[in-house]
Amino acid sequence: MRPDDPLVGHYLASSLVMRLATASRRGSPSLTPLWFVTVDGRLVASTGAATVAARNLAAEPRVTVLLDGEAAGRSELVLRVRGTAEVNPGMPPFAVLARYAAKYYLTRDGLRCELAHARRWGLRRRYHAQSEPVWLVIEPTAAELVAVPRPDAARTAG
């Protein structure tokens, strides 16, 4: 499946969290859940420079992203996107931040959640201040649908 396939677009539009799979220089895998937005067919996310994801991407830019399409309801399929990532220092451009706000904060449920947790905003600021910010741009190169493992599959395997 090509990254510009309409089904890929559906998963990108209906997924709230991407699971970013990276590998260290030694090949150790890591899976990081991140909020993301799309810009011109690319996935854009932000994190801290000191995170495992950012350090791994600085050493090895090849990534795999898993998307559940959870906003569209439960599915038996997950979209697996392969691509390359670029790590950029600082905060993303204002236009990207505006997309984040529209996707996560300015919805009815987003506003309700933010207001309900307003007392914890200071904790969030301290968490994000632990390292310098970076933003990631992931260029998809391939995509495929994969079946979600059944909970009983581990017991019946082998």
Image (cartoon, grey):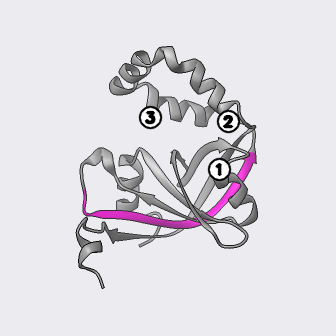
Disc 3/disc 2 C-alpha distance (Å): 16 Å
Residue lying at 68% horizontally and 64% vertically, measured from the top left = 61
Residue 103: numbered disc: 3
Residue lying at 64% horizontally and 43% vertically, measured from the top left = 47
Q: Is residue 62 above or below residue 34?
A: below
Q: Is residue 57 above or below residue 51?
A: below
Mark 2 Cα shell of 10 Å, populated few (<14), some (14-19), many (≥20): few
| Residue topped by disc 1 | 136
Which SS class for mark 1?
strand
Mark 1 Cα shell of 10 Å, populated few (<14), some (14-19), many (≥20): many
Q: Is residue 81 magenta?
A: yes
Q: How many marks?
A: 3
Q: Amino acid at mark 1?
A: Leu
The magenta stretch is 75-88
Q: Which sits in the foreground, 48 or 138?
A: 48
Q: Amino acid at mark 2?
A: Pro
Of mark 1 and mark 2, the one earlier in the sequence is: 2
| Residue 77 falls left or right of residue 139 | left
Disc 1/disc 2 C-alpha distance (Å): 12 Å
